[in-house]
């Protein structure tokens, strides 16, 4: 469908059009009817800000389509054949059910946002692109008349409105685009107390009864109009067009994210307690200067180093009401000499990462700002490793495929320890070195994992004297942190076991691998687990990546069991499911030197997998307490006192 919306400006006319392809439908049986239709362009200007726009007009174009209903609610789709010089369009269609002389007929323009159910036509106002063409493609236009063999004329009326938003950003903002928009309302900002956020109430869909012409505004989903297309920023301003329902805008706000910093959210106060009336068929311009800022979505953590520091929001204290849910007194809220809000962090001397949370109330919705102070050295110290331990069973279920050996179940048969807790020590390596990993692939989306990471930490205590290489990387610009365990099958990383039953034997930290025979499917588990991989593929090592979370003085690193696919040069899709301490006869690790049993002689000593439970010094699986989502976890809690929380403001400022 094409429908032209033209803005008539003070100096020049600017045109934009949109085209939406319709599905080819079976030609209905019956008599072809021709009708003529025009558009009542009462899109007059209503000013809510300074702008030269005079109004908007709409015209039909060839191939536009309309839904035509008879008095019984039978619908036929009509298509524009031509448009004359005055803008009157000629439509043709073939109803299944004959329409009699003098019968009532009604019509609704078909566009990108419309759908039909019986005699109800719905316009979905979500997923607009912010352009004038997209706004026009989400309009509701309706007409009614009577059928006559001598001719049918319809005049379409606009039942929604077009609003042009001119949004100013701070002068210091460097973004050349803004996106991730939401237009929403909150019924009463002053009464919102739930930290989970406000219940948004904006009408984002419009229904019309095609037989009566009665319009009903409704809410679907989260109750906002959203779109993701980025808008250009010129001279610190962006221009957005939206098709909106004919309702009063009250307690309304618009938010977006600048491409200069994906962690920011800017807010514009569109309408406060005094309502702005939006009438059907009118064009409005709303010009606003950005007045509020908040961090990105709830749950986002912002990383800072351990230095004492101040972060200034550059906003008047009255713009944001702040509640503290901090677990310590090291993070405080204060006001600078000009009345702007800022947060102050004392130096972190605890020797561990620490986190506190401030909660902002912005336009009635709550926004959590989680601050973590951490440096690489803070990850050194005493940790607890939680995992599910695989133990030996004399009669396991084993299958053999292409000289590979698999366990027939999720964990070892027989006795298992659901929550094996091992005290481990993490050391900081001042002379950190890069470690190269083979490429691994994720299925959704398909991306490559890190090829090289810096080995700046080591973990001891998992088994005897063996040391596991690990890494933490903190990006203070992007406010992100990642943790990895380095599982290396190369001879250069082989270690000698000291003490115990395997004293003097050689060992490597290897991945326990899960085999998924149904390529690409996480849902179908084939319950095959590989413990003695001969090779991971060049460079025969892999970083197993975990996610870091800090809550108060407790840091948790979780390693999931079905994250990465390893393509090892075989037909198998192998995923890391845990850590295995593989034992070898010599310092040259290979499938031939891998010890699968402590007893036996000759070739039997290498291939008798039925004693495999005794072959591995330690196998720690990712589902440490039989809940797959729990993964394998490293946990560190700093031994620091928990001071009294920051006091809440004496009174809330609800004058938004």
Image (spheres, helix red, strand yellow):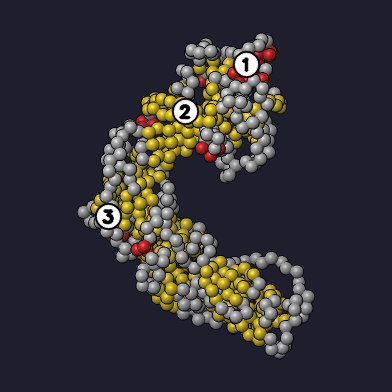
Residue farthest toward the top in the current orientation of the protein: 601
Q: Which residue is mark 2?
A: 421
Spatial separation of the CA atoms under disc 3 and disc 2: 43 Å
Q: Which mark is residue 625?
A: none
**Residue at the location (46% across, 71% down)?**
163
Q: Say which label, 3 or 1, has the lower sequence index.
A: 1
Point out which mark residue 597 bears. 1
Residue holding disc 3: 649
Q: State the SS at label 3.
A: loop
Q: Provide residue 271's location: percent of width, then percent of height.
A: 38, 69
Q: Nearer the viewer, residue 315 or 120?
A: 120
Q: Please report contact status of discs 3 and 2: CB closer than 8 Å, yes or no.
A: no
On screen, residue 430 versus residue 499, left or right, reads left
Of callouts 1 and 2, the N-terminal one: 2
* Furthest residue in direction right, as rendered: 29
- The reply, left or right, for residue 515 in relation to residue 201 is right
In the displayed structure image, the side of residue 49 where residue 436 appears, left or right: right
Mark 3 or mark 2, which has the lower sequence index?
A: 2
User: Where is residue 243 drawn, in percent x and y?
Assistant: 51, 70
Residue drawn at x 53%, y 13% is: 501
Q: Quadrant of residue 114?
A: bottom right
Q: Looking at the image, which residue is at 70% across and 78% down? A: 92
Give the total of numbered labels: 3
Question: Does the image show residue 510?
Answer: no
Residue 71 x/y as whole percent: 67, 82
Alpha carbon separation for disc pair 3 and 1 = 67 Å
Quarter of the figure with the C terminus: bottom left
Using the rendered image of the protein, determine whether residue 177 is visible from the camera's viewpoint.
Answer: yes
The quarter of the image holding the N terminus is bottom right
List x then y, in percent, for residue 126. 53, 63
Query: In the current view of this chain or complex, which residue is farthest to the front?
Result: 415
Q: Determine whether 366 is above or below 185 in the image.
A: above
């Amino acid at each position: 469908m094409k429908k032209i919306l033209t803005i008539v400006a003070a100096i020049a006319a600017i045109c934009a059009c949109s085209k939406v392809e319709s599905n080819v439908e079976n030609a209905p049986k019956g008599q072809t009817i021709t009708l003529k239709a025009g558009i009542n362009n009462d899109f007059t200007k209503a000013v809510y800000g300074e702008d030269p726009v005079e109004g908007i007009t709409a015209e039909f174009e060839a191939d536009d389509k309309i839904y035509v209903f008879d008095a019984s609610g039978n619908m036929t789709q009509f298509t524009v054949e031509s448009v004359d010089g005055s803008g009157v369009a000629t439509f043709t269609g073939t109803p299944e059910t004959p329409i009699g002389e003098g019968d009532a007929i009604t019509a609704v323009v078909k566009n990108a946002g419309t759908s039909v159910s019986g005699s109800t036509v719905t316009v979905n106002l979500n997923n607009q692109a912010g352009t004038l063409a997209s706004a026009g493609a989400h309009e509701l236009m309706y007409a009614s008349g009577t059928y006559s063999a001598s001719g049918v004329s319809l005049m379409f009326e606009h039942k929604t409105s077009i609003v042009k938003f001119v949004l100013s950003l701070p002068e210091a903002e460097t973004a050349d685009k803004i996106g991730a928009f939401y237009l929403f309302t909150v019924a009463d900002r002053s009464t919102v107390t739930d930290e989970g956020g406000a219940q948004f109430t904006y009408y984002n869909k419009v229904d019309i009864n095609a037989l009566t012409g009665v319009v009903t505004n409704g809410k679907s989903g989260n109750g906002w109009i959203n779109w993701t297309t980025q808008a250009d920023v010129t001279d610190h301003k962006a221009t957005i067009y939206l098709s909106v329902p004919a309702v009063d805008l009250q307690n309304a706000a618009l938010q977006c994210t600048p491409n200069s910093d994906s962690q920011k959210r800017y807010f514009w106060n569109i309408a406060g307690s005094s309502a702005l009336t939006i009438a059907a068929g009118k064009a409005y311009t709303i010009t606003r200067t950005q007045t509020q800022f908040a961090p990105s979505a709830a749950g986002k953590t912002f990383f800072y180093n351990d230095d004492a520091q101040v972060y200034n929001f550059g906003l008047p204290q009255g713009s944001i009401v702040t509640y503290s849910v901090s677990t310590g007194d090291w993070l405080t809220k204060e006001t600078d000499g000009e009345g702007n809000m800022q947060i102050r962090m004392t130096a972190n001397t605890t020797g561990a990462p620490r986190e506190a949370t401030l909660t902002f109330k912005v336009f009635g919705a709550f926004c959590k700002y989680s601050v973590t102070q951490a440096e690489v050295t803070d990850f050194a110290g005493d940790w607890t490793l939680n995992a599910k331990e695989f133990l030996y069973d004399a009669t396991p279920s084993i299958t053999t495929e292409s000289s590979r050996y698999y366990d027939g179940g999720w964990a070892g048969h027989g006795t298992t320890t659901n929550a094996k807790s091992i005290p481990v020590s993490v050391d900081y390596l001042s002379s950190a070195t890069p470690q190269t990993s083979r490429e691994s692939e994720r299925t959704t989306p398909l991306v490559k994992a890190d090829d090289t990471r810096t080995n700046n930490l080591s973990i001891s205590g998992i088994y005897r004297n063996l040391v596991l290489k690990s890494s933490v990387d903190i990006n203070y610009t992007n406010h992100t942190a990642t943790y990895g365990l380095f599982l290396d099958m190369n001879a250069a990383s082989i270690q000698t076991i000291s003490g115990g039953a395997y004293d003097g034997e050689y060992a490597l930290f290897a991945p326990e691998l899960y085999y998924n025979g149904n390529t690409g499917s996480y849902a179908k588990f084939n319950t095959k687990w590989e413990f003695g991989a001969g090779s991971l593929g060049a460079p025969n090592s892999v970083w197993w990546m975990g996610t870091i979370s800090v809550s108060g003085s407790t840091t948790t690193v979780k390693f999931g069991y079905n994250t990465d696919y390893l393509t090892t040069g075989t037909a198998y899709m192998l995923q890391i499911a845990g850590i295995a301490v593989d034992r070898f006869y010599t310092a040259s690790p290979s499938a031939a030197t891998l010890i699968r049993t402590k007893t036996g002689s000759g070739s039997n000593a290498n291939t008798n997998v039925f004693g495999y439970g005794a072959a591995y010094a330690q196998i720690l699986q990712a589902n440490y307490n039989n809940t797959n989502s729990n993964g394998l976890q490293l946990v560190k809690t700093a031994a620091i006192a928990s001071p009294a929380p920051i006091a809440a403001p004496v009174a809330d400022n609800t004058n938004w």
